[in-house]
Amino acid sequence: DIQMTQSPSSVSASVGDRVTITCRASQGISSWLAWYQQKPGKAPKLLIYAASSLQSGVPSRFSGSGSGTDFTLTISSLQPEDFATYYCQQANSFPQGFTFGPGTKVDIK
Amino acid sequence: QLQLQESGPGLVKPSETLSLTCTVSGGSISSSSYYWGWIRQPPGKGLEWIGSIYYSGSTYYNPSLKSRVTISVDTSKNQFSLKLSSVTAADTAVYYCARHFLTEGFDIWGQGTMVTVSS
């Protein structure tokens, strides 16, 4: 099984800050990684797929990078609507399965 | 635009079978290359993929749940369904249905439905 870890588990930041979240896979997953944003009581929203491809309609302040085992989600200038929990998800092992990371909560400093 | 909506009982007794349906509107469940999946999230916890199905009926399950899960599709009704047998309190969660294109992430989600396992 491919395990996913995320760091930090939570981060406090201010509007306008640059925020970076790291996701690590227990084995290489090429570029098959997605990032999601989830707000309380809502379904997750796809931000990034294939490690660095921006989903249609997602603001360009979100970007993703990485390949193999180490990946990064960057929010270049944090906006009020960006306070949420972010999850990474590996898709390399489909159809054997998908695995989500444990999440990173971004809250107001 | 494409929308997904989960439906089913919000309360299930321990040892019974949880049954949910996802209705797809604004598009066809038979669209080639798209898969349809179930994901769950226990209260206050992270996301867990349960399984996925292709419109042809091919199914793919999380190995940790495989012995208890059945996912099926009804193309005539534009629906797919989840059955999870022998439920326990650990199966209490919000259950989401979602669409994915092979390995490119789940791009469209239902709003989710809370299922509580309790006597």
Image: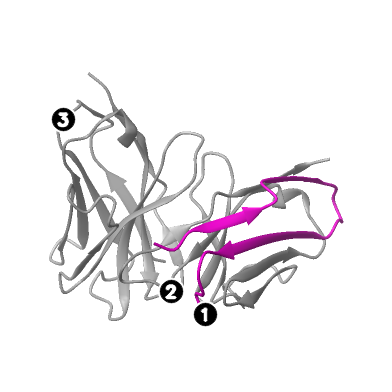
Disc 1 with disc 3 on a shared chain: no
Residue A74, horizontal then vertical, whole percent? 73, 65
Q: Residues within 10 Å of mark 3 (few under 14, many from 20)?
A: some
In the rendered image, which residue does mark 3 sit on? Answer: B15
Which range of residues does the magenta coloring cover? A1-29
Residue at (53, 77) in percent of width and height: A50
Residue A37, horizontal then vertical, whole percent? 59, 55
Disc 3 with disc 2 on a shared chain: no
| Quarter of the C terminus of chain B within the rendering | top left
**Pointer 2 indicates a residue of which chain?**
A
In the rendered image, which residue does mark 2 sit on? Answer: A92
Residue B22, horizontal then vertical, whole percent? 27, 53
In the rendered image, which residue does mark 1 sit on? Answer: A30
| Disc 3 and disc 2 in contact, CB within 8 angstroms | no
Instruction: State left or right for residue A54 relative to residue B100.
Output: right
Q: Is residue A86 magenta?
A: no
Instruction: State left or right for residue A105 relative to residue B85.
Output: right
Residue type, label 2: Asn
Residue B107, horizontal then vertical, whole percent? 46, 66
Q: Quadrant of residue A93?
A: bottom left
| Disc 1 and disc 2 in contact, CB within 8 angstroms | yes
In the image, is residue B57 above or below residue B68? below
Q: How many marks?
A: 3
**Pointer 1 indicates a residue of which chain?**
A
Residue type, label 3: Ser
Q: CA distance from mark 1 to mark 2?
A: 7 Å
Q: Is residue A20 magenta?
A: yes
Residue type, label 1: Ser
